[in-house]
Amino acid sequence: MDRIITPARILRGRIRIPGDKSISHRALILGALARGDTRISHPLLGEDVRSTRRCLEQAGIRISEKSGNLIVHGRGMGGWRAPASPLDCGNSGTTMRLLSGILAAMPFRSTLVGDASLSRRPMKRIIDPLGRMGAKITAAAEGTAPLEIDGTRLSPIDYITPVASAQIKSCVLLAGLFADGTTSVTEPSLSRDHTERMLRGFGVDVSREGLRVSVTGPAVLQGCEVDVPGDISSAAFFLIAASLLPDSEIRLENVGLNPSRTGILEVLDEMGADIERTSEREINGEPRADLIVRSARLKGTVIEGPMIPTLIDEIPILAVAAARAEGRTEFRNAGELRVKETDRIAAIASNLESMGVRVDIQEDGFVIEGPQTLHGADIETFQDHRIAMSFAVAGLAAQGGTRIRNAECAEISYRGFYETLGGLIHG
Ligand code: S3P
């Protein structure tokens, strides 16, 4: 279904951002490995998390839903059952990569499949370290899904990953929970650390020395309560929309501010955005606050190096901000964007170009000289939720109408996104 976005002048209001996607996946998965019940408050109920839920249910885990909250009836580390049919991870890389680490250690065979996009994404990055732990995994010739996993006994590993990826790190750490001894992962720079923080809440000892994180197996997880903060990656669309439209002010309630995710706030601060943090607090080891964003004149900046993993999912919407900012914005060392739900460097560039914005594309990034006028255009989402939402925001700040093709893919991470955005428009 297509959506037409018409230009808006002012955004005002107060919204509650849906639950963090990464934390919601992890709460379900760790809850399924735990003894006893895990209560998850304010989880994201988007398509990706539903994929995780369905896969766990196929592995014999009972999950009940009550007024938008979830209860996972954990079966312990040894209580999962062999799924009767392939586990469908849909569009979700997190589902496939995290579950692989667990299924590799289970005493049964399982198959993981995904949609067309997920079936093109690289899985060798998890098959290699898991293989070194003794896992038996067969992938398609290109190192992609479907993955056939023949569960077996795993040995611990001291793994140095070439990519700062929370999915790789979490996959290996989850496998390490089953191996006899200490499993460590060292990454080139810090990726989101929700797995490590949440494991502690489930009673697992996790140690960290700089960029090296370790767990010792065999581990026992105890069910607990997880209160999911709002997803800063979803908040980012509103932070930038309100920054770009004059006289706007929005309050975003209960946004997760884990330091491994707040690169977007640091960069927006550098660009001159006006964002205030209030009611700062920490629950389940995850800091959170309300954010108040007011319009501001943004200026260009350089986004590169260790900053990239801390805002990787926000680069599409930052590209829209860069187009309207005064001066040059450079995105470097962001080659990982090429293997997300779609090749996001190509998708950002082609859609900005359709809107009349010149983009200098490189292999691992791009450069935009701003400010440039955004002209309403036909947007190709490539079924990528973050491309759809980023260009809906671009449409608000554009001259003329914008058509978002297959706009419903936003539901992957944000149900009701367009309605929430529409509800903030005042003139
Ligand atoms: C995620 C990690 C990131 C991110 C993805 C969610 C996670 O992927 O882009 O949206 O929940 O661990 P990588 O680990 O591939 O960087």
Image: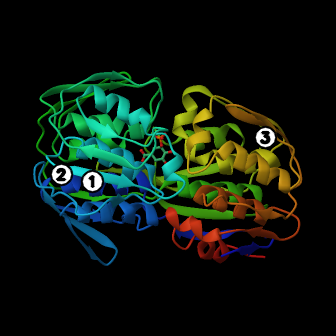
**Percent position of residue 380, x then y:** 72, 60
What amino acid type is highlighted by mark number 2? Leu
60 left or right of 295 in image: left
Q: What coloring was used for the rendering?
A: rainbow
| Mark 3: secondary structure | loop
**Percent position of residue 41, x then y:** 31, 65
228 left or right of 178 in image: right
**Disc 1: which residue:** 29
Residue 249 visible to an observer of this rendering: yes
Vertical arrangement, residue 416 with respect to residue 124, above or below: below
Q: Nearer the viewer, residue 262 or 356?
A: 356
| Mark 2: secondary structure | helix
Label drawn at residue 299: 3
- Taking the spot 67% from the left edge, 70% from the top edge, the residue there is 12
**Percent position of residue 30, x then y:** 24, 51
Which image quadrant: the N terminus?
bottom right
| Mark 1: secondary structure | helix
Which image quadrant: the C terminus?
bottom right
**Disc 2: which residue:** 33
Query: Answer yes or no: do the residues labelled 1 and 2 have beta carbons within 8 Å?
Result: yes
- Quadrant housing residue 170: top left
- Taking the spot 43% from the left edge, 48% from the top edge, the residue there is 145
Q: Nearer the viewer, residue 259 or 175?
A: 175
Q: Nearer the viewer, residue 177 or 104?
A: 104
